[in-house]
Image (cartoon, rainbow, N blue to C red):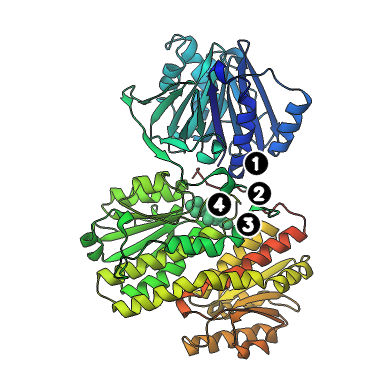
Amino acid sequence: MCGIVGYVASSQRAGQHQAMDVLLEGLRRLEYRGYDSAGVATIADGRVAARKKAGKLANLVAEIEAAPVVPALVGIGHTRWATHGGPTDVNAHPHLGDGGDLAVIHNGIIENFSALKAGLVRAGESFDSETDTEAAAKLIGQFYRGEAAGDLTEAMRLAVNELQGAFTLLAVHADQPDRVVAARRNSPLVVGLGEGENFLGSDVSGFIDFTREAVELEQDQIVTITADEVSIMGFDGVAATGKRFHVDWDAAAAEKGGYETFMEKEIHEQPKAVEDTLLGRTDAAGRLSLDELRIDPAQLKGVSKIMVVACGTAAYAGHVAKYAIEHWCRIPVEVELAHEFRYRDPIIDSSTLVVSISQSGETMDTLMAVRYAKEQGAKTLAICNTNGSTIPRESDAVLYLHAGPEIAVASTKAFLAMITASYVLGLYLAQLRGQMFSEQIADVLADLHQIPQKVQHILDHADAIKDLAREMAQSPSVLFLGRHVGYPVALEGALKLKELAYIHAEGFAAGELKHGPIALIEQGQPVFVVVPSPHGRHSLHAKVVSNIQEVRARGAKTITVAEAGDDAVSEFSEQVFFVPETQPLLMPLLTTVPLQIFACALASEKGYDVDQPRNLAKSVTVE
Ligand code: F6R
């Protein structure tokens, strides 16, 4: 939520990289984090040049092209997801302090900003915007002129000790054209290391075009970057060192690669995402071995309960995980939205394993749930796609997805990878606890390894789904039904349609329909039904077929997603999308795909931006 970049180069680099080029390129890559407005500030000729514009980055770029700023070697840039104050030019970042000589950008929420603002107004400051950030800018400016005596790092340090909430702050000052100073508490920030130039970014994509060498920062740290140096200290002023890492994907992985949109690209990357998530999980004897988990297997063996915490799509992956893990391991699994979890006094002890699922590894609600679980003595395990992000860093154990960068705001390939990783975890626990025979585990693994080619088959035969999406572009409402693992798939299908196509969509457990929601059905109401395998629990298949008949009897137009060869559903469906056969528990890896394609195609038909849907942002770093 909000993308942040910072850049400093030595004068020798002048002519190679201008700060403005680096900042705009970084913002282009980080725009998925927020696109309500964008802004930059550079320092040249002893002055701050700040430009900011409401709307997408393209608006800012057009403005800068029309009236270029003086070339500079230092600067900061921001792309905003609005919290305090609407998405206007005035509320866009940067915000200025110290009489306009200081520029500040911010990701997060400063919770005590009203009290700070009141004090700053009493001290003679005046405010232009409705943002919390402007209070931070004025506060840093006050310290810079006063107690910190012209030391920008110290001014930042004194200021952050007065702030409550979550923030990444970056500051530049007209008097100090050789540095950017940044601070982080509970919001993401990484340093990129160059030669004669250094970078800051909300994540590595902010500088991936220029370097793949990076440094992780801990919570409550301040970093000062110059062209040749990176110095880190705690909020207490004590010097610290960061952990260096190499980014194992390159800039091309974050490009559209011939697709019109990142969303289409990522939907098509799903066979590889599943394959990469499965890669290297078994030893020479074919047994699952999860070395990267970095947790003592004996501890996992003693787990008496699993609680999955996650948000949105990741939480739906957690619902799928519940069915599989309980079935394979006979351990009770609860799934809870991370933002509800810690406020209800959950029953946790040292034998509870709290599994977080997060693509970004930065979702604040999930991070707070993980911290809460640790405080209560639980073991924490992160299923995550983003190497070095905060949630895996703060967890006892981690299972990375290896699905590659997901840029489209709405999650697709990470969902399939999360489900795959949670199956791997479930099978591993079953192996450790002796709940399944090794042949049974090998059998599921073999079927999992078949999934990529089956997803590819669906992708290769998607024309009918896209045609239907075009026909249904004007539908005001679509319902989704499923049972068992098909239920979270129905929820995910509805979420994709809501967020991409802005259509009212609801997912229901098919059995719940008769308890109320069936009242919504009227003539022509489109209802997608995720049909379980006829080869699994036969009674469940028959029950879903009955549910289809119930809604059809009331005028619904039913569209089914069913297993190839399931002729029983055809006669009750306006249209059927068949997916290849697999084990019943693995079906979400296939049945989700037509629903993603449908939502994406329908939104494109309506002319919407599927990569950056309105009001949303990837990586939700506020509570
Ligand atoms: C929906 C979507 C969101 C995220 C949720 C959690 O398409 O992308 O619902 O799944 O915000 O994000 P992560 O996985 O980064 O924790």
Give the percent coordinates (x, y) of residue 407: 58, 49
Looking at the rendered structure, the kind of residue marked 4 is Glu
What label does residue 406 carry, if any? 4
Who comes first in sequence, dot 2 or dot 3?
3
CB within 8 Å, label 2 to label 4: no
Who comes first in sequence, dot 4 or dot 1?
1
User: Which is closer to the viewer, label 4 or label 1?
Assistant: 4
Label 4: how many residues lie within 10 Å, few (<14), some (14-19) or many (20+)?
many
| Residue labelled 1 has its Cβ within 8 Å of some atom of ligand 1 | no
Label 4 SS:
loop
Looking at the rendered structure, the kind of residue marked 2 is Gln
- 3D distance between C-alphas at marks 4 and 1: 17 Å
- 3D distance between C-alphas at marks 2 and 3: 14 Å
- 3D distance between C-alphas at marks 2 and 1: 8 Å
Label 2: how many residues lie within 10 Å, few (<14), some (14-19) or many (20+)?
many
Label 1 SS:
loop
Left or right? Give the position of 390 relative to 43: left
Who comes first in sequence, dot 3 or dot 1?
1
CB within 8 Å, label 2 to label 1: yes
Label 1: how many residues lie within 10 Å, few (<14), some (14-19) or many (20+)?
many
The number of numbered badges drawn on the structure is 4
Residue at the location (55% across, 42% down)? 1
CB within 8 Å, label 3 to label 1: no
Which residue is disc 3 drawn over? Answer: 265
Which residue is disc 1 drawn over? Answer: 35
What label does residue 612 carry, if any? 2
Left or right? Give the position of 69 relative to 123: right
Query: Which quarter of the picture shows residue 37?
Result: top right
Looking at the rendered structure, the kind of residue marked 3 is Lys
- 3D distance between C-alphas at marks 2 and 4: 12 Å
Look at the image and tell me whether residue 20 can be seen. Answer: yes
